């Protein structure tokens, strides 16, 4: 039995154990519900990875090398499907613990919209306009469910400015995390740290359900990482746009959903500081590209293929580079998949 199958089998056993009511009640009685949520999301994602990997190969959702891409041979995408499903299934299976508030429903629906759009982009490729429309629809969903960054006076112009800022925040963070996904483990690791700090701040500010929501995202990311960031071998699977867009949108939604301070302007700095790396990376590259005339439209911005992102600078330093690939190409028989473990 291969390592990934063993991991999947062990994860299924743990999931079945956690679903026993007495086990869940034990975690609650010991006041370690966060451990329950972490284990459940981690095991769900781990168990789903082999399934989505096989499905990605069957439908042709494979990232082939070329251009600015750093991997040496085709690698399956759709790892984001395992992250998404691991997170969403926790929302369903542990609904009595997490309590689906109106805001959480908005985050879940909006995240589903960007995930589906990203998955379609991974399979067939979508234009920047389509992706932008989907992200606007997801941001509008948050606003419809009452999730708006609130820091201006309650006037018509204050409400309008807050809506515009919310849309800008959601689209900016969604694409910022997407831009980080260029080196094995970078987007997943960064999102894990971001979600962990959201959970810690939520714990300090007495927001237990927000803390558990963040921990669920941490577990889903950790379940994906061993298959994407391996010490001596290349990634077995990439998260794709489906995963990076989902993580970016969910982190942006958590940043709006939480009550991060008694003073609005002070509280507003918390999500900005936590998401500082993707914000700085995207802001710096955007300013440089606009000043040099390399980017003039949203489509050029989202599809620009320069080597000026944070992960490219890491690669130039020799960090995160992989030479082998999880799949091999056979010119005699088309795409002949040979798995490396």
Image: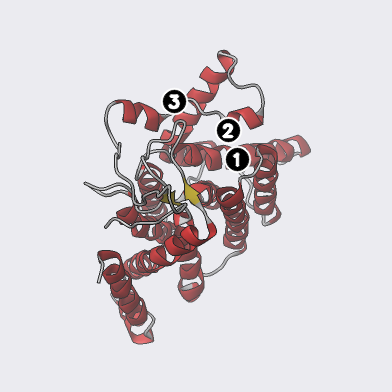
Give percent across and percent down for residue 115: 57, 54
Residue occupying the point 62% across, 37% down: 168
**Number of other residues with Cα within 10 Å of mark 3, as a class: few under 14, some 14 to 19, many 20 or more:** some
Dot 2: element: helix
Give percent across and percent down for residue 265: 53, 36
Residue 98 makes an appearance in the image: no
**Number of other residues with Cα within 10 Å of mark 2, as a class: few under 14, some 14 to 19, many 20 or more:** few
Residue underneath mark 3: 307
- Nearest-to-viewer mark from 1 and 2: 2
Most extreme residue toward the top, as rendered? 292
**Nearest to the observer: residue 240 or residue 107:** 240
Give percent across and percent down for residue 226: 30, 55
Dot 3: element: loop
Q: Is residue 192 above or below residue 54?
A: above
Residue occupying the point 33% across, 46% down: 325
Dot 1: element: helix
Residue occupying the point 28% across, 26% down: 317
The quadrant of the picture occupied by the N terminus is bottom left
- Nearest-to-viewer mark from 1 and 3: 3
Residue underneath mark 1: 171
| Labelled disc at residue 303 | 2
**Nearest to the observer: residue 275 or residue 321:** 321
**Number of other residues with Cα within 10 Å of mark 1, as a class: few under 14, some 14 to 19, many 20 or more:** many
Query: Mark 1 vs mark 3: which is more N-terminal?
Result: 1
Q: Is residue 93 above or below residue 254?
A: below
The quadrant of the picture occupied by the C terminus is bottom left
Q: Is residue 269 left or right of residue 235?
A: right
């Amino acid at each position: 039995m291969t390592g990934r199958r063993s991991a999947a089998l062990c994860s299924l056993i743990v999931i079945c154990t956690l679903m026993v009511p007495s086990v869940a009640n034990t975690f609650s009685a010991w006041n370690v519900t966060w451990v329950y949520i972490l284990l459940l999301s981690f095991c769900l994602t781990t168990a789903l990875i082999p399934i989505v990997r096989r499905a990605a190969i069957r439908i042709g959702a494979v990232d082939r090398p070329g251009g600015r891409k750093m991997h040496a041979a085709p690698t399956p995408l759709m790892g984001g499907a395992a992250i998404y499903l691991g997170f969403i299934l926790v929302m369903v299976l542990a609904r009595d613990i997490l309590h689906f508030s109106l805001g959480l429903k908005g985050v879940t629906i909006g995240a589903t919209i960007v995930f589906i759009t990203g998955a379609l982009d991974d399979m067939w490729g979508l234009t920047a306009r389509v992706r932008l429309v989907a992200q606007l629809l997801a941001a509008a969903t948050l606003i419809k469910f009452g999730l708006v960054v609130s820091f201006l006076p309650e006037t018509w112009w204050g409400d309008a400015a807050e809506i515009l800022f919310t849309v800008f925040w959601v689209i900016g963070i969604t694409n910022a995390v997407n831009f980080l996904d260029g080196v094995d483990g970078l987007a997943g690791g960064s999102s894990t740290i971001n979600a962990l700090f959201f959970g810690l701040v939520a714990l300090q500010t007495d927001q237990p359900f927000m803390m558990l929501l963040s921990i669920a995202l941490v577990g889903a990311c950790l379940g994906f990482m061993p298959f994407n960031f391996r010490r001596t071998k290349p990634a077995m699977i990439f998260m794709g746009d489906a995963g990076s867009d989902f993580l970016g949108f969910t982190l942006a939604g958590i940043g709006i959903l939480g009550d991060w301070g008694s003073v609005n302007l002070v509280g507003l700095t918390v999500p900005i500081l936590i998401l500082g790396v993707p914000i700085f990376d995207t802001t710096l590259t955007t300013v440089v590209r606009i000043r040099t005339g390399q980017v003039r439209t949203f489509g050029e911005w989202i599809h620009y293929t320069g080597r000026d992102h944070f992960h490219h600078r890491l690669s130039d330093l020799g960090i995160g580079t992989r030479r082998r690939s999880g799949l091999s190409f056979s010119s005699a028989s088309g795409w002949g998949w040979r798995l490396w473990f």
